[in-house]
Amino acid sequence: MRKRSFFGLSKPSFHYELATDIAATPVAIPTPETVQIYIKQELTRSSKILKTGMSVKTGQRLQLNEGDSIGTISSVTGTIVSIEPFLADYGQTWTAITIETESSDIMDTEFADFIETPSLETLNRFFPTCPGEPDFQPLMDERNPVKTIVIYGGNADILIDTGLLVLKTKADAVNEGIEVLRKITGIEEVVIVVPEESVQNYSGHLDARIQSVSSQYPYAQPLMVLYNLTGRLPDENGAASLGTYFIRAEAVASIGEAFVTGRLPVNKTITVIDKQGNKHLACARIGTPVGKMLDTFGVEVNDQDKIIFGGPMTGNAIYSEDLPIGPDTDAIMVQDKAIIPLYSDYPCINCGDCVHICPANVPVNLIVRFLAAGQYTEGADMYDLYSCIECGLCSYVCSSRIPIYQYIKLAKYELGRITSAEEMNEQ
Ligand code: SF4
Ligand code: SF4
């Protein structure tokens, strides 16, 4: 929520949504005729396992080839109608699986065999594409032992209710999930981070230390939270380089729910923000087309309107209503073409607005020149790219409408890729 004009003497001020603001019960979106889910792996040849025409069950683990460590979970019961390459953000190549759904669910039972013997391998096999999309690699990396599990209960952007809603409505599942994580990892120190005005809604209900952060944007940004907890920001190795493991509350609830019921959760909680800024809460199968979500709430998308996955500061624009919601899609926002701030190729005019607003004191006006030229290593080395907490405020205020935040995200992604490749070569 915007509190003040950008054009006054003070910095602009935004606030996250609070637990007390969340009144509605999520609307259950009916299962669509088709869903599309992804395996984050390139389709280099025909799958030996998955074929079009093959029947799948709800909660069934799907993988392309025998021995693959990467897979996905079917969110519906139905028939596979296509298996195709998919070009994801930053040029990543994944595999898209489209499933024609059947009217009733048949639940897969493979996971149920593992609930008595929880292990990190089990989590890594069944949960990376569950609601909340947890990444278990940091817990498996012996070079950076994790001492603290940080559960992120807030939202990564303004206008979004998803994280706090999960904590408010699924406290039992979150507690079960915490117990599973403690048992598997042996880590006792578990912290749940929420915006300060929301603390009273959770203390006493959750089996972990509640840590409040300011509800002013961007203090509940994941990287800002890490900085406040540890006094440092992670390098290209992520939160594990600080001895912390970061996981969303929704992912913890997914783990808890699954280990109690023996069924893998397949429904994602989402905040839909319409063109007037009204919020609608929804619960839908992972893989549901965005258009189906928008139709439910009567949100019409016209030519040149913008659909964004995420919030106004840090969200990513998508190009089609046919794209599906993923396990990490916390919000869908639609902006009317009349209010879309267009990016430009104007040069930096050194107005200093980005430097003035940056909470991390990054010399944005200098680093942006290197990043725009693709000189990521130089920009990172000379101007401390990893101090950036990815709040997007610099892009929001930039007089030249330079997509600074997008340059920063791309630079971090590319540098992370280079680091991973170097580590692979050393092995
Ligand atoms: S550089 Fe931009 S995105 Fe990064 S912390 Fe500063 S204002 Fe936020
Ligand atoms: S806000 Fe934009 S134009 Fe102004 S100094 Fe920063 S990058 Fe340059």
Image (cartoon, rainbow, N blue to C red):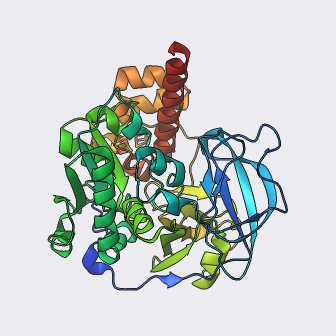
Q: Nearer the viewer, residue 322 or 242?
A: 242
Q: Residue at x 48, y 56 (%)?
A: 114
Relative to residue 358, is residue 198 drawn left or right? left
Q: Return the x and y of residue 297 as percentages of the image width and height.
A: 57, 84
Relative to residue 399, is residue 190 drawn left or right? left
Q: Residue at x 44, y 37 (%)?
A: 349
Q: Find ligand 1 in the image and state its quadrant.
A: top left
Q: Return the x and y of residue 75 as percentages of the image width and height.
A: 62, 67
Q: Return the x and y of residue 284 as percentages of the image width and height.
A: 56, 74
Q: Nearer the viewer, residue 67 or 366?
A: 67
Is any part of residue 375 visible from this angle? no
Compared with 23, 36 (above or below) is: above
Compared with 423, 335 (above or below) is: below
Q: Residue at x 41, y 53 (%)?
A: 117
Where's the N terminus, which quadrant? bottom left
Is any part of residue 390 visible from this angle? yes
Compared with 397, 8 (above or below) is: below
Q: Nearer the viewer, residue 423 or 72?
A: 72
Q: Return the x and y of residue 11 as percentages of the image width and height.
A: 26, 54
Quadrant of the rendered structure where residue 81 is?
bottom right
Compared with 365, 78 (above or below) is: below
